[in-house]
Amino acid sequence: MAEIILKTREEIELIRESALIVSKTLGMLASEIKPGISTLKLDKLAENFIRDHNAVPGFLGLYGFPNTLCVSPNAQIVHGIPNKIPLLEGDIISIDCGALKNGFYGDHAYTFAVGEIDSSIEKLLRITKESLYKGIETFTEGNRIGDMGYAIQNHCEKEGYGVVRELVGHGLGKIMHEGPEVPNYGRRGRGKKILNGMVLAIEPMINQGTHRIKQLKDGWTILTADNKVSAHFEHNVALINGKPELLSTFKYINQSLGIESDEEILFYKDHP
Ligand code: MG
Ligand code: MG
C-alpha cells in the first residue's frame, strides 16, 4: 500500500467536503431503498446526486470499476456491481460510495435493511456499527493502528462473528487508498504509530459466520465463504490535536430513516 501522507488542516477540510457529499448521497439513498428497487437505479441516482454537487464519483473507473456505487447484498461483503435485480423484503444491502472534489476523496459506507429484517441480522448490523465507533475511539495520539484493530475485532468476535482479514481500511487523501493499512483485527501496541494529520477510512467488514471469503467470477464481488450475511460500515476520520474527528456522518441517513442517535457526538468537530 502507498505511503502515509499526513494532511494539513486545509487539506482535512477539503476531504471533509468530499466525505460530506458521500454522507448526503447515502442519506438520499436511504429514502430510496425499499423492496422492488434495483441497485442499478440506486447507482444512477447516486451518480447524478454527486455530479449535482460538483463532484465526481470516486469509484467510477477506479482500478476499472464500472459504477458509482459498490452494492453488496446479503452474503456479499464488498465490491458488488450494481444490476437490475430488484431488492427484496428482508435483504440487507451494503453500499460503499466515493466522491472526488478539489482533488481529494471521500469514501464512506453503510449497510441498510430492506424492509423488515431478521432480528439476528439486525444484531449483526448493530454490532458492526458499534465496532466502527470502538475503532474510532482508539484512533488517538499515543495509540497504534493495532489498538484500533484489536478494539474492532474484540467487539465482533465476542459475538461469534467473523472479521474479514483480506480487506482493510486505509489512509485517504488525493489517493483513494493511501497508507497505512487499517486492519479490523490486530494486537494492542502493534502497528504504525497514530499521528496528527492522519486521515483514515475505518471500515469494519464483519460476517455473521466464518471470516473466510470467496470472489465471484466477475473479478470484483467479494462474498462470504459460507454464504452467511455480512455487514460493512465506514467512516472517514482525521486525527486533530490528538483526537479523532469525524469527517463523514450518518446523520443524513438517520434523518431519512427517522432514527435518533447520539453515537457520533463524541467525534464531532470541537477542536478550535
Ligand atoms: Mg469505501
Ligand atoms: Mg474505504
Image (cartoon, rainbow, N blue to C red):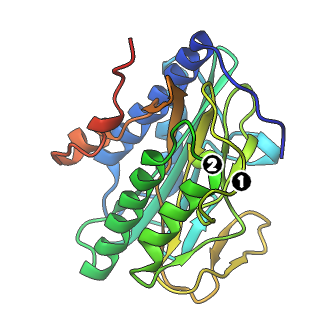
Left or right, 227 with reference to 193 = left
Q: Which residue is at a point 57% across and 13% down the rendered structure image?
A: 9
Note whether ligand 2 is within 8 Å of mark 1: no
Left or right, 173 with reference to 154 = right
Nearer the observer, 119 or 241:
241
Badge number at residue 191 = 1
Quarter placement of the C terminus: top left
Q: In this view, does 137 lie above or below 141?
A: below
State the image coordinates of residue 207 (x, y, percent, origin top left). 51, 76
Please state which amino acid type lies under the numbered disc 2.
Arg
Left or right, 252 with reference to 206 = left
Per the image, label 2 sits on a secondary structure element best described as: loop
Q: Which residue is at a point 64% across and 85% down the rendered structure image?
A: 225
| Image-quadrant location for residue 180 | top right
Q: Which residue is at a point 44% across and 85% down the rendered structure image?
A: 160
Q: Mark 2 points at which residue?
A: 144
Mark 2 vs 1: CB contact within 8 A: yes
Q: How far apart are marks 2 and 1 (CA)?
A: 6 Å
